Image (cartoon, helix red, strand yellow):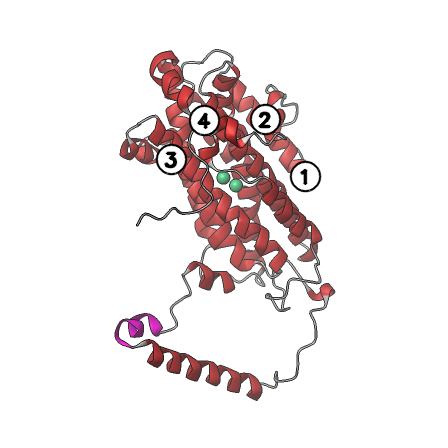
Amino acid sequence: MYSRAFFGRGYQTGSTTDSGRLGIREIRGRTNARLGRRTKNRIQSGSSRRPGPVNVDDKRVINGETDINQLAPFKYPWAWEYFMNANKNHWTPLDVNMAQDVHDYHHRLTAPEKHVYENVLAYLTTSDILAMRNIGLAVMEKMSAPELQIYQARQVYEEAMHTWAYQHCIETLNLDQSEIYNRYRVVPAINGKIQIANRRLDAAMRPDMNLRNKDDLQEFIMSYLFFAAVFEGTWFYNGFSPIFALQRRGLMRGTGEQLQYILRDEAMHFSFGLKVVNQIVEEENITFDPKAVREMWDESEAAEKAYANYILRDPILGYSADYHSEQFRFVANRRARTVGLEEPFPGAKNVSPWLDEQATLRKEKNFFETRVIEYQTGAQLEW
Ligand SMILES: [Fe+2]
Ligand SMILES: [Fe+2]
């Protein structure tokens, strides 16, 4: 419930219409009266005793009943580590020099390469918004340990920044924004992937979902598994490759670098997500339904194949649709193993071994060497 309030859906306690008509003092008076009523209720329900500290063993990923506002003691110290590490990776799209990309796009890319570039961006722009909504609206509210929510809050921010990065590329290249943002609706091969994700997200956002109910729990865990293992762990992880293929040939290097920073974030997102899935499975004693898992992989593979065949209908130098689909299957096997599932595509080959290198980008680039604009540490005021 907490994050619903945080994100606005639950923030309707009756004062929204009042605030338009009442003065601040009156609103305060009403709020105090309401708080007073709540305190009274608590006293009546016998919980007026001074509460003791949270017992770490009582914390749970979901369905926990400890105080969500008390961070320590940590039950999941690794979640706090993820938060610390994510903050070491800070970057913004403005850190990357895009000047060469403008020239490359207009003078060096072939028509099939432009087709690849634009459609990958068209897919990613929508996908990152979906990723943000999933973690912020469907997942975070169900977590009952704050250390998990804190990393997820950072993740929400990072997804928003990824959207900014795509928008920055689209703006810099002066692409037709309304056309490119609308592609996911009119291109069936892009729409197919978005539809699958939307369906999983809607399932996890059902307002009457009760995680103490076995069927609802299965639905939620399958949605979370899909977003961590497929959506971020495979579709995203593998999804930047066509542009990396250009980058490796010295084309669209600014965009390639933006995507490397995004991929580094995404590698943490799916790894965290899969860790949380494993933890829920253990705590809630869940067994995955093999049929549902098989369907998830098959559906995701079919959608990825259709997408690859569309964006790479004409192969580009060093990259093809078959290459893309095979790498999807190889990465999917890895994600499955992480959550103790059998490999969905046995024998799939690692045809893009360079992809892992792209994700484990260690260097922090020298700001002042690569930035095209002056460094700003805050808003500048004009008087
Ligand atoms: Fe993202
Ligand atoms: Fe992500």
Bounds of the magenta segment: 15-22
- Residue at disc 2, secondary structure: helix
Image coordinates for residue 10, horizontal then vertical, percent: 42, 65
Badge 2 amino acid: Gln
Type of amino acid at the residue the image marks with label 1: Thr
Q: Position of residue 163 (x, y in %)?
A: 42, 39
* Amino acid type assigned to the residue bearing label 4 in the image: Asn
User: Residue at left 51%, top 64%?
Assistant: 2
Local SS, label 3:
helix
Are discs 4 and 1 less than 8 Å apart at CB? no
- Viewer-proximal residue, 254 or 199? 254
Q: Which residue is mark 4?
A: 97
Instruction: Find out whether residue 17 is within the magenta segment.
Output: yes
Residue on which disc 3 sits: 167
**How many other residues sit within 10 Å of disc 3, few (<14), some (14-19) or many (≥20)?**
some
Residue 236 lies, with reference to residue 88, above or below; the image says above
Q: Amino acid at mark 3?
A: Gln
Q: CA distance from mark 3 to mark 1?
A: 33 Å
Q: Relative to 224, does residue 178 appear above or below in the rendering? A: above
Which mark is first along the chain, 1 or 3? 3
